[in-house]
Amino acid sequence: MTFQLTVEELANLIDHTLLKADAVRTGFEQLCREADQYGFKMVAINSAPVRLCAKMLEDSPVHVGAAIGFPLGQTTIESKVFEVENAVENGADEIDYVINIRELKDGNRAYIRNEMERIVAVCREHHILSKVILENCYLTEAEKREVCEIAKEVRPDFVKTSTGFGTGGATVEDVRLMKSIVGNEVKVKAAGGIRDFATAKAMVEAGAERLGTSAGISIVEEYKALVMEES
């Protein structure tokens, strides 16, 4: 096995995820403890529990990421901007928002750009990271290219493959495609269906610099065991 990252570096690429509608307080408390223990980059949550998680992680380097317009993206730009501002006020320091797929499908490039510009502007104002979720399972290759080309101009911090709630998740092909378009101007986050080390490794090698998954612990433990076997 040839993989350049250490166990700690791999863990620090992972956004530890709990986005289920029926998640309860104890689940978020466990999520935060695990993220801190393993050195994950971020906890990925809906905007409602942001204040709880921010309080739990106030002395930790782990970031708190709010999912905006999640998972459908079918709220107005104004609603998404308000949700971003509210999440930041409650302690979020990363934002993952879902584009308005309907507007993209209708060919409204100006809408997609305006939405991205306004949300990225709020994030920049507060010095926090922004990630644009394409939800690739619903998009043609041309549509994926179009959003990534807009992102290369607007400069969010990341473009992201999926919510994990669509009909499909991250694919190596999509990560490669997105990376080929945004280059070094914008990073790529792979999310959805990443449940083992082999898949995580493939995404990183394809160009992903962040991984969204609820299986972060098992991925890191699997990699740790492989490293120990080889040492």
Image: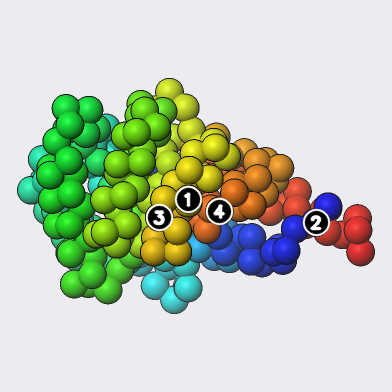
CA–CA distance between discs 4 and 3? Answer: 11 Å
- Of residues 28 and 108, the one nearer the viewer is 108
Task: Give the residue number, with chain letter if any, for mark 1.
Answer: 180
Q: Amino acid at mark 2?
A: Thr
Estimate the spatial distance between the alpha carbons at disc 3 and disc 2, rounded to whole Å: 26 Å
Task: Give the number of the disc on residue 31.
Answer: none
Mark earlier in primary sequence (2, 1): 2
Do the residues bearing badges 3 and 1 touch, measured as CB atoms within 8 Å?
no
Residue denoted by label 4: 207
Amino acid residing under circle 1: Ser
Q: How far, Cα to Cα, is label 3 from label 1?
A: 6 Å
> For this rendering, which residue is in front, 91 or 192?
192
C-alpha separation, residue under disc 1 versus residue under disc 4: 9 Å
Camera-side residue of 83 and 201: 201
- Left-right relation of 4 to 186: right
Q: Earlier in the sequence, mark 3 or mark 2?
A: 2
Q: Is residue 35 visible?
A: no
Closest to the camera, between mark 3 and mark 2, is 3
Question: Considering only order in the chain, which callout, 2 or 4, is on the residue closer to the N terminus?
Answer: 2
Name the kind of residue labelled 4 in the image: Gly
Q: Are marks 4 and 3 in contact (CB under 8 Å)?
A: no
Residue at 83% across, 52% down: 1
Residue 215 image offset from top left, x and y in percent: 59, 43
Q: Earlier in the sequence, mark 1 or mark 4?
A: 1
Instruction: Report if residue 125 is visible in the image.
Output: yes
**Foreground residue among 32 and 84:** 84
Please give the name of the residue rendered at 52% of the width and 58% of the height, measured from the top-left corner. Answer: 209
At label 3, which amino acid type do we have?
A: Val
Task: Please say if 16 is above or below 167.
Answer: below
Q: Where does label 3 land, which residue? A: 182
Q: Are marks 2 and 1 in contact (CB under 8 Å)?
A: no
